[in-house]
Image: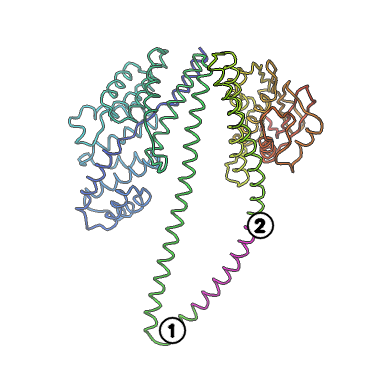
Amino acid sequence: MTLKLLSFFFFLLSFILHSQNNNIEDKLFSAIFEKSKKNHSNDDFKKASIFFIQKNWDSTLIFTQKTLKKSPKEKSIKNLSFFYRGVSLFRQQVYHEAENQFGLISNDFEFINKVQVYLGAINLKLKKYEKAISYYQKLTKLPNKESLYLNEAILFDDLALCYFFLGNYNEAESYFKKSNVYEKDTLNLIDSYINIANLYYQQYKDNIAIPYFKKAYNLSKKINVDKKKFSEKDRKIYYRKSVATKNMAVVEENQKNLKKALLYRKEYEKYIDTLNNRNRIYEVAQKEKEFAVATKQKEVDFLQVQNELKETQRNNFIYIASILLVLLLISGYFYREKVKTNHIIAAQKETLNELNATKDKLFSIVSHDLRSSVNALKSSNAVLVDNLQSKNLEALENLLQKNSSIVNGAYGLLDNLLNWALLQTDQGYFHIDTLRLFIIIEHVAYNYKPLLFEKELTFENSVSKKAMIAADQESLKIVLRNLLDNAIKFSKPHGALKVYVEESDDFWNLIVEDTGLGMSEETRLELLKDTALLNKKEHEDVLGTGLGLSLVKSMIRKNNGKFNIESELGKGTKMIVSLKKVSLSS
């Protein structure tokens, strides 16, 4: 029962709230823009209309504010200005203020039905479900919804969500089915399948819910994306793929199909990584675009100055002398700026050389280990083919487990490489907060259950629930993932893993203990050195570069903590992380 309730809360988070169809909304915006052209007397309103059709929400808010300050007499200008502001604030997720702006629109506004759509969506997002229902119910009774720029499928879907969150499952089921009938858009159809599945799953109707989850997953697999352009639509597709895949992972976990669940989770992580990488690329592209615009603007400004100078030269000698004096001063200023810039460039070059040296060393070792992983996988696959032909199932299972370990090791190496790069370039988000250590360990350890099960290792989290520490949550999770990964990697089958704490004056000493291979004193001292980026491996048959441990030490230092190792060859290892204690009273 507990597992089922936990999975329900997971699925609840996977409900997808619809927005109005983009094509319908674009048609609406075009119709509104055509209507706004009739009001040419107000320049600020004209600019606001142009920015609105371009979906430049900040500029729309600025010029509508200027329009309303002048108190226009035309009722249509006021209504459209309030509508522009409501939509802009809604798009920027300022829901309370958006509701206030929509409330100022008069009831005889030509697009009042669309205003009610936005008010319903706002109240749904603010969790005022009964109020949202009152708006949506009125809209469902209107004829010719398409001519009113309404999407009937989305209206029914949003109504179903409202009834679901109110606990009225019969009404929710009815409207979800209606939505499914009217839905034509593939992405929205995936959303509907997921929402219907969650509805049944909440009612413990697994035999009905699971086929809908599978429908959503299978449909998401059929959608292709343009990997070169990766538009906003492609982002939405990847998001649906990730939600559908993650739902399937939890379904398989609940059915104790851990191997299938692990495959789904890996597929989900692939989608999430793609989204994260593309988001970073998109942000860089935006910055480059802004820089290009700024550079072009400087060029325009410079040309304008040149034209002004030419006009001035046609005047008298006094003006020419004044301009020459100004140019001399500007030249001096730019010369000083150039000298200053050269100093900055020299310093940056020195830093860049150091980073390149570190990068070359890192790439050399990482590429060597990746090559070893791929070579091991290649050799294993050759043996796998031979055993497949001979139908040696026991050998096949062992080889598949070996391949899985190799792939997991390579994936962990790449994940550590990304986090190490973010740490070196100071791009990661870092915020020290008060954390309960037991809960963090439970969250991280949950993802390692399949690996623990596969290697038949026992795991015990006996950390005191009173242990409160001051640390950054995400970097602490990276530390724990690497320590648990190493403990599992260097443990023998049927071994044991324990995580516990020991209290000192100012620190909680978090200890990750295994009964694995252990290490020599020479290796232990080498691993504790700050200068070594990567270390020689004690056990050549275990994949690893030492990058994870280097990342662990860096993260612990950033959290004002300490790190130590206790180990003996053949008798297991204790990895000790000391973190600042926070008293419960504080």
The answer to whether 255 is drawn above or below residue 553 in the figure is above
- According to the picture, the residue beneath numbered tag 1 turns out to be 320
Left or right: 79 as drawn, with respect to 187: left
Three-letter amino acid code of the residue under disc 2: Glu
Q: Position of residue 334 (x, y in %)?
A: 54, 71
Label 1 SS: helix
Q: Is residue 48 magenta?
A: no
Residue 350's label in the rendered image is 2
Which range is magenta? 327-349
The crowd level at tag 2 (other Cα within 10 Å; few <14, some 14-19, many 20+) is: few
The crowd level at tag 1 (other Cα within 10 Å; few <14, some 14-19, many 20+) is: some
Q: Position of residue 65 (x, y in %)?
A: 34, 52
Ranked by sequence position, the earlier of labels 1 and 2 is 1
Query: Disc 1 to disc 2, how far (Cα)?
Result: 45 Å
Query: Which secondary structure is most common in the magenta stretch?
Result: helix
The answer to whether 556 is drawn above or below residue 203 in the figure is below
Left or right: 427 as drawn, with respect to 43: right
Work out which residue is located at the far bottom of the displayed protein and give it: 317
The answer to whether 444 is drawn above or below residue 33 in the figure is above
Residue at the image point whose x is 41% and y is 74% from the top? 306
Residue at the image point whose x is 27% and y is 22% from the top? 178
Q: Position of residue 337 (x, y in %)?
A: 57, 68
The quadrant of the rendering that contains the C terminus is top right
Residue at the image point whose x is 21% and y is 51% from the top? 74
The scheme the figure's colours follow is rainbow
Q: Nearer the viewer, residue 388 or 170?
A: 388
